[in-house]
Amino acid sequence: MKSSLWRDAIARLRGDHLAMTSVWLLAALVIAALAGPLFIGYREDEIDWSHMAAPPFEAAGHWLGTDRLGRDLLLRTLLGLRVSLAIAIAATLVSLVIGVGWGALAGYLRGRTDALMMRFVDVLYALPQVFFVIILTVVFGRGPLVLLVAIGAFGWLTMARIVRGQALALREREFVEAAVVGGAGTLRIVGRHIVPNLLGPVIVYATLTVPQVILVESFLSFLGIGIQEPLASLGNLIADGAAELETAPWMLAVPAGCLVLLVFSFNFFGDGLRDALDPRDR
Amino acid sequence: MRYKCRGMSTVAFIMRRLLGAIPTLALIVALSFLLTHLAPGGPFDEEQSLPPEIRANLEAAYGLDQPVYVQFGRYVRGLLHGDFGPSYKFRDFTVSELIADGLPVSLTIGFTALLLALAVGIPAGILAALGRGKLPDRLVMTLAVAGISVPVFVIAPLLMLVFGIWLHWLPVAGWMPGRPMDLILPVVTLALPVIAYLARLTRGSLLETLRATWIRAARARGLPERTVILRHALPAALLPVVSYFGPAAAAVLAGSLVVETLFGLPGMGRHLVQGALNRDYTLVMGMVIVYAALMILLNLLADLVYAWLDPRIRPERQS
């Protein structure tokens, strides 16, 4: 029965042109980020002294031009894409684990525990996530690892709310009652019976979390609080480009275009997935 | 207010919500304090090899040699008197001075941006809904999708490039009190994503409301279309828009970090970014607390507007 739910969903997704275009675009971006750098004849820190800040298609071998230090822009953008994607996926996984655990436990336990746990979520909701992440980077320093943990640690709030709502409904079902009668403990019921049954919404929301994380990471890297040179990320490449706006606008256009495409396609893919898994909402 | 008080007055409603905000704010204060003080390392770690005596003196001067709970007590007592402590890096300023310095700038930009977003976003959404499927609708919706997926830190340099560098219409950066030209680009940058979201939200909500049976009833009574839309449909259609106030304010707050840094405006956002770059613990903490207080106030405002628009949840309702 489960397999047919997924088969139906995939069939519906296939019919959604926007979502399918996004899937192919995403696949292309991921492959380019992983394999692309291998096909570029430059090293990431290699400086081309004869072509500094060269516009696209002008200098041989630098298809999208170079930055002000003469580094290949396409290569740096692809490496930045790789870093941004890696952080986004890792941070989404961190927030997934916390959010699902927190929400499922709160929804299953109900009562005062639930109220207390969700009150905590409400409090954290009072501020945009970036501010907490900024506090953490101030305390623990700046770097990819701190960044992904910090983003994950404050990105789970909405996930927890969604999961809690589902868990509240699931806990009334017969199979949970059966598990209780069978003598299963709280953690076992939540882990083995509640969580597997709410994977649908969790997957959808995780897909929609990835672009949000990408935006938070680029936002911080843009401000100089996130990923630091010489490591490239889409955010600090855009900051470099914004600084050279007058003289080298392609330095902004290339990474910014890449970021917008990435966020676009993740959002449309997530929306398509939601419609495919839950056709009632349409 | 246009309604009579039976149960709870509006003032009581506001008072109750303000009291309810105190634990939230207290928790945020405690959380940011704990995060900064329980972590290994301190604010003077980065200065290369301070002699131990000097380091001890510095820590004693800032009270960092005391146990954490004493420091917390002192910090909270300071907060209650409006004292956010000294800045570790801007040695001549207290955090309160930096806040007093930046807050008016940030509030000016932020509120202007929010008002602009409301003034443009809602009418654009109404226009799109009324001309559904026609050119204005397509135009508004395309712009809305673009406005939502292009982040502020890409919009800002683009606007600078077009209006500042290519067209020379507006100054690219700088701030002089009483020169409104400086504010146009920052405010528009902040407002654009909110305009996009508001337009989409208003359009969807109005289209849905216009399908309701009581709208058909109003039309059947022979009311002019203008009255039906403005007096009957719009207040109901605006409810989801009002719920978006909170997230909109959050977007403007976060965006102000980018906008103030990029356009060189001396607001709180730029101080916060500077504080984060310098690892200035007290400065970052103070700014975050002020931002949290602002967010809580804005959410309260949104709740009041919501209650005013929707008779079902007016605070004095008793049944």
Image (cartoon, rainbow, N blue to C red):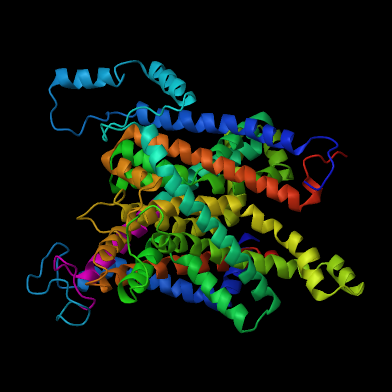
Is A75 inside the magenta-drawn segment? Answer: yes
Position above or below: A243 against B293:
below
Q: Is residue A148 left or right of residue A103?
A: left
Q: Nearer the viewer, residue B72 or A264?
A: B72
Position above or below: B77 against A205:
above
Give me the residue at 59% from left, 73% from top: A11
Position above or below: A276 against A102:
below
| Image quarter (top left, top right, bottom left or bottom right) of the C terminus of chain B | top right
Please state the horizontal and vertical placement of residue B55, each as a whole percent of the image. Answer: 19, 22
Give me the residue at 43% from left, 33% from top: B32
- Main SS class of the magenta portion in the image: helix
Name the residue furthest right.
Answer: B221
Please state the horizontal and vertical placement of residue B47, each as a whole percent of the image. Answer: 17, 33
Please state the horizontal and vertical placement of residue B230, each as a whole percent of the image. Answer: 76, 67
Give me the residue at 29% from left, 38% from top: B279
Residue range highlighted in magenta: A63-90
Is A259 inside the magenta-drawn segment? Answer: no
